[in-house]
Amino acid sequence: MTRLFAGTPFDIPPECDLCGLPETDCKCTPDDKAEAEAKRQREADRIPPEKQTARITTEKRKGGRTATVINGLTAKANDLPALLSQLQTACGTGGTVKAKEDLIELQGDHTTAARECLSKIGFRVK
């Protein structure tokens, strides 16, 4: 044993979080590491559905069309596109996400179906 900490946890070289290789042998690009860090941060920012309240309203649009608007769910705490696809499947309609305004819009009046779908996922609904 020639090194001071040979065989102890302090002697183990640091490993890359992505590939598991020692830092000196790591082949991960800085872009890969930045993407992995961003993904970890998104997962850390997530809030469980039980702690969030979704507000469902119906808006009248020009031309006599109606839209179901779901707000109160932030884009930082949720994966709004995935939630939109679940709502579209449950309601059988089209829709869009407005991430800047933290809104989900569904075409037509689907308040009851959206309320059932969101409560099934675990969100509190008003």
Image (cartoon, helix red, strand yellow):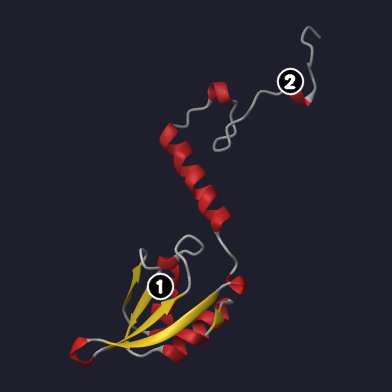
Label 2 crowd bin: few (<14), some (14–19), many (20+), radius 10 Å: few
The residue under label 2 is 11
Q: Quadrant of residue 47?
A: bottom right
The residue under label 1 is 85
Q: Is residue 54 left or right of residue 63?
A: right
Extreme residue in the top direction = 2
Distance of mark 2 from mark 1, alpha carbons? Answer: 49 Å
Q: Give the answer, above or below, for where 19 lies relative to 100.
A: above
Viewer-side residue, 124 vs 91: 124
Q: Position of residue 86 (x, y in %)?
A: 44, 75
Give the amino acid type for the residue marked by disc 2 in the picture: Asp
Give the amino acid type for the residue marked by disc 1 in the picture: Ser
Q: Give the answer, above or below, for where 49 lies relative to 37.
A: below
Image quarter in which the N terminus is found: top right
Q: Is residue 52 left or right of residue 79?
A: right
- Identify the residue shown where x is 38% and y is 74%: 104
Q: Quadrant of residue 122?
A: bottom right
